[in-house]
Amino acid sequence: MGLLYESTGFVGWGIWVFVLFALMAFNEFSRTTKWGGIFLFLIVPAVLTIFVWPTTAAPGNEYGTGTWFNWVKTYSALAGCLGFMIIRYYPSLTKKKWVLWFPPGILALNILEACIRDFQVYTYGVWNGAYIDHLWVMSGPWNIMNGIAGLLNIVAICGWTGIYISKDKSKDMIWPDMIWPWIIAYDLWNFAYTYNCISDHSFYSGLALLLACTIPTFFIKKGAWLQHRAHTLALWIMFVMTIPSFADRIAPVPTTHNPTAFFIVSLVSLIANIALVVYQFYRIRKYRLNPLKDEIYIETNSYQQVLEDNRIAV
């Protein structure tokens, strides 16, 4: 597979495709049915927390699922799913300004957690790579580059005052101002994070997981990227916490452990997020906008397409 990953065969790609479509299918189940969401994001994790994860994600286990990051990421993702469901099924809450701070807040928190992890991996000083907490990592300037890219991505979160709930049966949380430049910059940053910090798991937790929320955003339900992302992330991390041997033993696809690959991936992430922030601040200055109150991209085709697809006119 060239620069990024060791080669994998037909079976390996078949498993990857299955993971991708399974995540998308469960996302649709949880998105389109209220009880599907309650079952997947409340009942299932409650049972797993009591009966399964204390064993499969115990501190120091051989698969690295017992780290602080895995536990924090699991519950922050679930908090996002449940919080969004409350907003979706009680749409009058969107009229309260403080409620609309929750979606960008939980998103920023999730990005910040990963930035801290990237910086932490740099402090390990394993310049030639090593297993730490049973995960292979290699410290380098890429950790700093991508940590900065993530912080820039947080700065570029905008337009949450325009969040509304769709009028159709699924009652999706629509965020029109979260248009494709931000989504692509996020995807590039998050892939670089997985490549840097959970390197040999990134074939699934990077490529498959990111596509599982990006594809629905562009082709199934436009404007609901954050909802898609929260659902697929929570589903994946619950799976990993439950079957931690999946990426290491059952269907491993390791990276090449090539420093050049790490550098290129994080450089692309950094450039994309610098460009995003520069473009956004250009629009803020040109149109004299307040990024804490105003939507930034309301005149763009991407924004208008989200409104049209969700039958909202402005």
Image: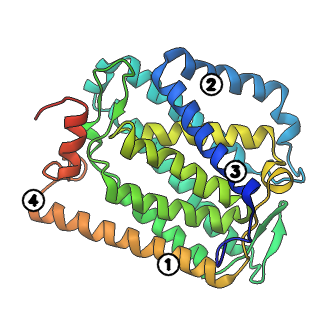
Determine which quarter of the picture holds residue 192: bottom right
Amino acid type of the residue that numbered disc 2 sits on in the rendered structure:
Leu
Residue designated by label 4: 287
Q: Secondary structure at mark 4?
A: helix
The quarter of the picture where the N terminus appears is bottom right
- Asked if disc 1 and disc 2 are in contact, CB closer than 8 Å, the reply is no
Residue 131 position, x and y percent, is: 84, 68
Toward the front, the furthest residue is 10
In the figure, is residue 190 to the left or right of 11?
A: left
Quadrant occupied by the C terminus: top left
Q: Which residue is mark 3?
A: 14
Please name which of the two marks, 1 or 4, marks the residue nearer to the observer: 1
Q: Position of residue 191 (x, y in %)?
A: 56, 62
| Residue 283 drawn at (x, y percent) | 17, 63
Alpha carbon distance from label 2 to label 4 = 43 Å
Residue 282 to residue 26: above or below = below
Q: Position of residue 277 (x, y in %)?
A: 31, 67
- Which three-letter amino acid code belongs to the residue tagged 4? Tyr
Sequence order check, earlier mark of 1 and 2: 2
**Which residue does the numbered mark 1 point to in the structure image?**
267
Q: Which mark is residue 40?
A: 2
- Tell me what residue is drawn at x 62 percent, y 66 percent: 118
Q: CA distance from mark 1 to mark 4?
A: 30 Å
Tag in front: 2 or 3: 3
